[in-house]
Image (cartoon, rainbow, N blue to C red):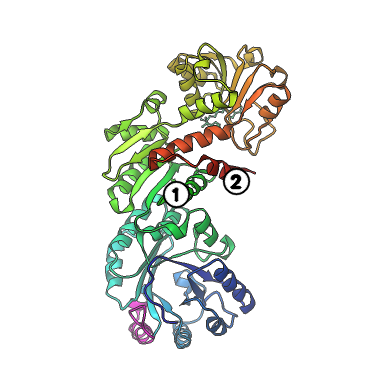
């Protein structure tokens, strides 16, 4: 099949099933998932009638017979492999993939592959995809490799390396940005997943996805469905602005689902990704430096979560960025805004988000908090935002925490009072705020507050949002107390971030719907 140069990055799906029946099912599923191009992994489709399948499919096909020394399973000799590729070429797939080390390593292979393929996409012979793989790292001599591959008669250059850390993506992004001919430039592994999405932003030739993780052909491939539904693949173009969440770990993060859905709802040209950065300031700073140095990536905003909120503040201070008063008061930044001319600003949306959730849910105003006794359970990051906000609003804050020393130091910093956890049942506070992780999924049977001490004159705010109705809140409802769950706080802080980035009100109803769909 002859194809013309695509206007946008193609989504490729590998066909990996060993026999014809299963391979046909994969092809039909890939077509139904709106894949743009298929890769027939002939080394894995050993018992299939690949020529019949090739004739049947309406999608363009890349034919690959990957040998074992290149991460594949073609176990025959090199001359058997070349024989297979000769037969394949006669069946006219759109492309034949051939490995660069084998191409430069043998004059016979060079001559043969050059005779059955062609160096352009729209000729009547299969185009040559000249591929280089490194399954362990991004090699330090990648510059040389790229320049040597550029001298081969390739229609498409393919460079796929393993990213040990997210930092390894950046040199690959540079090659993608500078590429003068159609290129496939991807990083394997979890740390490389962003490259599979950003391929569309960088305008490379294609990105490999999969039907499901079980049917993937390389580590880190993202399913076609996920690329489309979570990352809005079809909306990403060279003009798309990039956003994301920095944290470690991030497996649980609901932020990509919420922000991408909100971008979609208002028709905003943005993409929101997870950025997993190891917990050290140096890692955080290196990531920021690398991203910001590459203007072509259009990084415009970041959410920052555990354990990098203090690192974000430090980085922004070192870069003389604007820091908003709540971030200064709490001592951490959870939102970064990057202007088109590269100016940085840091915000903390947790403080207002928490106070607004509490007061709106309880039907009181911020001013009503003045002079009220509030028991804050916990002394971690969320407690810090609540204590900073509540003390600023004039509430009398009592902190109860498993680790007493942590409660004492938090209390000292914000003018609150630390109380021994054993005295919690005697608390006189009528506003109870849970900032511990007790009750959070999967340990949903736990509660931080004795059930017998709950009463109908209380307001109980549980910042845990997964599940939205915790054991504490169920018991508080039974006691006749007013209850506030953690989802409003979560959505409030995300909505503020969204507005800071887009200058538009957040579609809060969409954010709530996404949270509900994910949590239920
Ligand atoms: P964190 O900094 O790790 O603090 C966790 C707190 O929970 C600490 O005070 C810790 O006490 C206490 N804790 C943990 N396990 C405990 C146990 N078995 N018994 C008694 N106390 C225990 O976490 P964080 O960022 O503050 O988050 C706390 C919770 O807030 C999360 O679990 C999450 O559910 C919720 N959250 C809500 C939102 C929202 O927007 N609604 C956002 C983020 C987090 P020690 O000091 O003794 O370790």
Residue in the image at 40% along x and 57% along y: 198
Q: Label 1 crowding class (10 Å Cα cut-off): few <14, some 14-19, many 20+?
A: many
Which quarter of the figure is the N terminus placed in?
A: bottom left
- The numbered mark at residue 327 is none
What is the x, y in percent for residue 125?
39, 85
What is the x, y in percent for residue 290?
31, 48
Which residue is the site of mark 1? 273
Measured along the vertical axis of the image, is residue 242 above or below residue 49?
A: above
Which quarter of the figure is the C terminus placed in?
A: top right
Nearer the N terminus, badge 2 or badge 1? 1
Q: Quadrant of residue 512?
A: top right
Measured along the vertical axis of the image, is residue 319 above or below residue 298?
A: above
Left or right of 276? Residue 181 is left
Q: Nearer the viewer, residue 358 or 133?
A: 358
SS at badge 2: helix
Mark 2 touches mark 1? (CB < 8 Å):
no
The answer to whether any part of residue 1 appears in the image is yes
Does the magenta-highlighted stretch encompass residue 46?
no
Residue in the image at 43% along x and 79% along y: 94
Q: Nearer the viewer, residue 262 or 470?
A: 262
Segment colored magenta: 103-124
- The numbered mark at residue 518 is 2
Q: Label 2 crowding class (10 Å Cα cut-off): few <14, some 14-19, many 20+?
A: few
Does the magenta-highlighted stretch encompass residue 113?
yes
Left or right of 118? Residue 453 is right
């Amino acid at each position: 099949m002859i194809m013309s140069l695509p206007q946008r990055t193609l989504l490729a799906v590998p066909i990996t099933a060993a026999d014809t029946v299963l391979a046909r099912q994969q092809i039909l599923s890939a077509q139904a998932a709106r894949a743009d191009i298929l890769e027939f992994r002939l080394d894995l489709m050993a018992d299939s009638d690949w020529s019949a399948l090739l004739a049947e499919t309406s999608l363009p096909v890349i034919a690959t017979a990957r040998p074992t020394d290149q991460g594949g399973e073609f176990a025959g000799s090199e001359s058997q492999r070349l024989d297979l590729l000769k037969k394949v070429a006669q069946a006219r797939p759109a492309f034949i993939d051939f490995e660069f080390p084998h191409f430069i390593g043998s004059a016979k292979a060079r001559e043969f592959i050059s005779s059955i393929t062609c160096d352009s996409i729209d000729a009547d012979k299969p185009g040559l995809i000249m591929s280089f793989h490194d399954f362990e790292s991004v090699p330090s001599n990648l510059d040389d490799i790229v320049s040597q591959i550029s001298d081969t008669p390739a229609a498409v250059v393919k460079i796929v390396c393993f990213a040990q850390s997210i930092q390894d993506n950046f040199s690959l992004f540079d090659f993608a940005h500078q590429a003068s001919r159609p290129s496939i430039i991807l990083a394997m592994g979890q740390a490389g997943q962003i490259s599979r999405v950003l391929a569309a932003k960088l305008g490379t030739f294609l990105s490999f996805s999969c039907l499901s993780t079980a049917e993937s052909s390389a580590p880190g491939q993202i399913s076609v469905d996920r690329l489309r539904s979570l990352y809005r693949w079809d909306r990403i173009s060279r003009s798309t602005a990039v956003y994301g969440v920095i944290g470690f770990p991030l497996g649980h993060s609901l932020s990509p689902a919420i922000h991408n859905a909100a971008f979609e709802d208002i028709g905003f040209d943005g993409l929101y990704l997870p950025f997993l950065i190891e917990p050290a300031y140096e890692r955080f700073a290196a990531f920021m430096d690398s991203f910001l140095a590459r203007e072509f990536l259009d990084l415009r905003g970041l959410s920052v979560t555990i354990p990098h909120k203090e690192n974000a503040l430090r980085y922004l201070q070192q870069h003389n960025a604007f820091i908003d008063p709540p971030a200064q008061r709490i001592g951490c930044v959870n939102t970064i805004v990057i202007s088109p001319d590269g100016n940085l600003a840091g915000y903390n949306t947790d403080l207002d988000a928490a106070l607004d959730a509490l007061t709106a849910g309880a039907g009181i105003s911020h001013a009503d908090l003045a002079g009220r006794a509030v028991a804050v359970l916990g002394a971690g990051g969320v407690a810090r935002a609540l204590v900073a906000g509540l003390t600023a609003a004039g509430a009398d804050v009592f902190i109860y925490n498993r680790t007493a020393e942590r409660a004492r130091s938090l209390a000292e910093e914000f003018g609150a009072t630390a109380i021994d956890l054993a005295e919690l049942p005697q608390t006189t506070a009528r506003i109870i705020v849970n900032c511990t992780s007790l009750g959070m999924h999967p340990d949903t049977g736990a509660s931080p507050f004795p059930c017998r001490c709950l009463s109908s004159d209380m307001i109980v705010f549980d910042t845990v949002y997964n599940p939205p109705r915790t054991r504490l809140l169920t018991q508080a409802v039974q006691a006749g107390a007013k209850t506030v769950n953690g989802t409003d706080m979560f959505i409030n802080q995300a909505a503020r971030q969204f507005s800071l980035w887009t200058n538009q009100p957040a579609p809060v109803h969409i954010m709530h719907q996404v949270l509900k769909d994910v949590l239920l």
